[in-house]
Image (cartoon, rainbow, N blue to C red):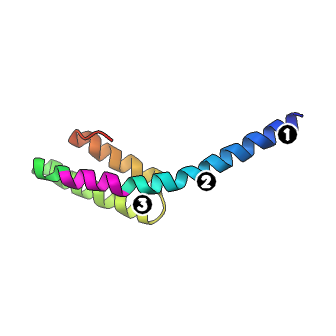
Amino acid sequence: MIKRIFLTAAVTVFATGLLSAPALAAHCPKDVKKINAALSKVSGEKMMMAKDSAAKGLTLHKTGNHKEAIKVLHAAMKDLGISH
């Protein structure tokens, strides 16, 4: 009985991970678009930071590291005052 519960829990966690990866993958480009749209409202150091973060996030996205890409992009969005 307990073996069955653990097996069900493991399968559920694994399936959730597989299903959430595509959702994260689609999320990255949308965040980059939001950052790029906000660039016209900032200048100087904030603009350079946002451009660098958007480029880094997109690179991480393309290499398949979506979790790290989301972290980078959301940090940039927070600095720019953009909601995600």
Q: Position of residue 30 (x, y in %)?
A: 33, 54
Q: What residue does disc 1 label?
A: 4
Mark 3 or 2 closer to N-term?
A: 2
Tell whether position 31 is magenta: yes
**In this picture, is 29 found above or below 12?**
below
Q: Which residue position holds label 3?
A: 61
Q: Quadrant of residue 84?
A: top left
Viewed as shown, does residue 2 lie left or right of 59?
A: right
- Asked if the residues shown at circle 1 and circle 3 are in contact, with their CB atoms under 8 angstroms apart, the answer is no
In the rendered structure, are the residues bearing label 1 and label 2 in contact, judged by CB atoms less than 8 Å apart?
no
Residue neighbourhood size for the residue with mark 1, other residues' Cα within 10 Å, grouped as few (<14), some (14–19), many (≥20): few
Q: Residue at x 86, y 34 (%)?
A: 2
**Amino acid at pointer 3:** His
Question: Which tag is nearer the camera, tag 3 or tag 2?
Answer: 2
Q: How would you rate the neighbour count of disc 3 (Cα within 10 Å): few for under 14, some for 14-19, many for 20 or more?
A: many
**Which residue carries the number 2 mark?**
18
Q: Is residue 7 above or below residue 30?
A: above
Which residue is at the front of the view, 16 or 48?
16
Which mark is on residue 81? none
**Helix, strand or loop status at disc 2:** helix
Amino acid type at circle 2 is Leu
Name the residue: 33% across, 59% down.
Answer: 56
* Amino acid carrying mark 1 in the image: Arg
Q: CA distance from mark 1 to mark 2?
A: 21 Å
Residue at 40% x, 47% y: name it: 71
How far apart marks 1 and 3 lie (CA) works out to 36 Å
SS of the residue under disc 1: helix
79 is within the stretch colored magenta: no
Image quadrant in which the N terminus is located: top right
